[in-house]
Image (spheres, grey):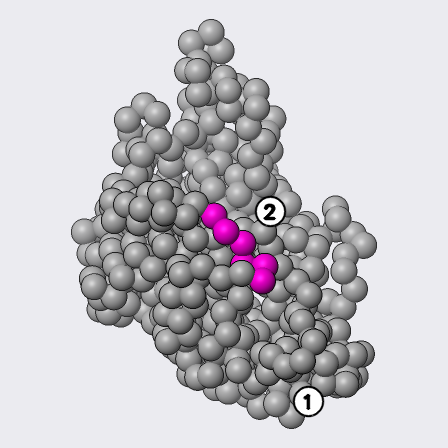
Amino acid sequence: MAASANLNGPLDADPVPTGSTAGSGAPEPSGPAVNKGTESRLQKLAKRNLWMHFTRMGSYEDHEVPVIVRGEGCYVYDEHGRRYLDGLSALYCVNVGHGRAELADAAAAQARELGFYTNWSYAHPKAIELAARVADLAPGNLNRVFFTSGGSEAVESAWKLAKAYHAERGEPRRHKIVSRNLAYHGTSMGALTATALTPLRVPFEPLTPGGVQVPNTNSYRWQEDRDELWAADAIEEAIEFQGPETVAAVILEPVQNGGGCFVPQDGYFQRVREICDRHGVLLISDEVICSWGRLGYWFGSERYDYLPDIITTAKGISSAYVPLGAMIAGDHIAEPFLHGKVAFNHGFTFGGHPVACAVALANIDVIERERLCANVLANEGALRGMLESLRDLPIVGDVRGAGYFHAIELVKDKDGKETFNAEESEDLLRGFLSGELYRRGLICRTDDRGDPIVQLSPPLIAGPEQFEEIEAILRPVLSEASERMERWSSLSRA
């Protein structure tokens, strides 16, 4: 597979927060070719000084950088005043939509009162209040909230806590972490070990030791006679092969982002929970994307009815108005660190930043007041139905996902599920789809870190009106893409 991903932005180039080595998503370099003498000040400064994440920077030499300057509801506007439907919630994170004055007001009020104080041996009211609010919403006994600045830090913290927990209980050899193929768990060196995407890992090897990968739940690519829970059982096989006394944790997303919204089979997480308990291994639910209403529940683990030992979260906790993440641990996990001179020797300067916590509290208020979890559950059928209606297109192989988190897998041959090779995928995604969708006013994500997909994750305030807009752009563009790839194949055969 060609290894790159992108949100979709103007033209033929690679992704932005996901590129030929990436894994997040953002507008891709494309946009009209420009006369450098007439470029805006923002364009010149962006090209001279801004090093964008997961981006082929050279792609912008002759094309505009997509510069988003304003947001309102489900829409954002670029520097030219053009409007785009934000079908990816920026990066699966602006859950309550853009332009929420109450979140800005909460930030300003807190900054005036206490701009910053650290959580290193100190507390402040907003961190305390948010920790209590999160604990109240989290499932089971997950009552201990350790704040971070974002998702990678939350995953890093969870793995470190798992190792420290086992060490405090007399099992210091437990250090390994099991994750699934194509999973994305972050880019810091520890989180990258759990991230099972070769192009992201190889440039930075050697990684932190201890990563173990197992099959994911993409049943579209399974043999028809395969047992429904074989991917869960593969986790037990991996633990037994590694030696249970060396395995600290299993980390899984409720719906796996990498590869394109892989959902679990019925009973999958219950089987995994049994396996972890049998071998004394902690279960980490990575909900950086899948929490705060994305799947129609406060936490994705609630949708699939399993209780993890630790939850990692970020993105939607503040709707990304300010950076914030958290690791939420069960009381039983925190217990060894609550007595005597023991400490969990880990932290981040900005974890639990008072302004971020104030915004998160206001964000949760919005989700509750406007019943956005219920909105997702009420409308996910309409979103899914719209995407399913695209199956009549020859290029659409599979539709999958849950809540407001869905993907379409693109294929060369629907009957044989034949995928595109690396060269074809490059032309399909970066040569056409990404830029064309953006030009027509839709921001979503095209990605081929697994098989080529188009991914959609709109703000939780979206409804049928936005779904109709998405279809009005997506259907003709996918139809043109199908014709384009058929011509490509014909030329290749000639």
Q: From what the image shows, is residue 253 above or below residue 444?
A: below
- Residue 216 located left or right of residue 400: right
Q: Position of residue 388 (x, y in %)?
A: 32, 62
Residue at 36% x, 54% y is 358
Q: From what the image shows, is residue 4 above or below residue 373?
A: above
The disc, 2 or 1, on the residue closer to the chain's N-terminal end is 2
Question: Can residue 200 be seen here?
Answer: yes
The kind of residue on which mark 1 rests is His
Label 2 sits on a secondary structure element that is loop
Q: CA distance from mark 2 to mark 1?
A: 34 Å
Q: Position of residue 484 (x, y in %)?
A: 45, 39
Q: Position of residue 393 (x, y in %)?
A: 36, 53
Residue at 45% x, 59% y is 124
The kind of residue on which mark 2 rests is Ala
Secondary structure predominantly adopted by residues drawn in magenta: loop
* Residue 203 included in the magenta stretch of the image: no
Which residues are drawn in magenta? 116-121
Observer-nearest of 78 and 130: 130
The residue singled out by tag 2 in the image is: 22
Observer-side mark, 2 or 1, equals 1
Question: Can residue 477 be seen here?
Answer: no
- Residue 180 located left or right of residue 172: left
The residue singled out by tag 1 in the image is: 279
